Image (spheres, grey):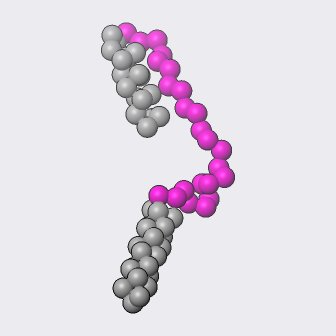
Amino acid sequence: MRKLVGSLGSGLLVVGITAGVWWNWFHEPYALADAPKVDVTVRAEKSTYPDVQETTEDVDTLVRV
């Protein structure tokens, strides 16, 4: 019986620590939880450089991540 109570107590401790870590590290901060989402679009300007479109697509992907 003591082993069962000890195992149950250890299990609850692990669950509590896991929930605490998730809440503090992976949960959005309170100030950002209700903030509106932002949509960013990057558009290439007219340019004489040939690789502007490719660079714009790379930057767009990076900004979205």
The answer to which of 15 and 41 lies nearer the viewer is 15
Q: Quadrant of residue 37?
A: top right
Residue 50 image position (x, y, % from top left):
33, 10
Residue 26 image position (x, y, % from top left):
47, 58
Picture layout, residue 24 above or below residue 58: below
Q: Residue furthest front?
A: 1
The answer to which of 22 and 45 lies nearer the viewer is 22
Picture layout, residue 32 above or below residue 59: below
Residue 61 image position (x, y, % from top left):
42, 29
Q: Is residue 29 magenta?
A: yes
- Which residues make up the magenta segment? 26-48
Q: Residue furthest bottom?
A: 2
Q: Is residue 45 magenta?
A: yes
Q: Quadrant of residue 56?
A: top left
The answer to which of 43 and 34 lies nearer the viewer is 34
Judge left or right: residue 21 versus residue 34.
left
The residue shown at (37%, 26%) is: 58
Q: Quadrant of residue 47?
A: top left
The residue shown at (40%, 33%) is: 62
Q: Can residue 27 be seen in the rendering of this structure?
A: yes
The residue shown at (51%, 64%) is: 23
The residue shown at (50%, 20%) is: 43
Quadrant of the image containing the C terminus: top left
Q: How many marks?
A: 0
Residue 7 image position (x, y, % from top left):
38, 80
Q: Can residue 13 be seen in the rendering of this structure?
A: no
Secondary structure mainly formed by the magenta segment: loop
Quadrant of the image containing the N terminus: bottom left
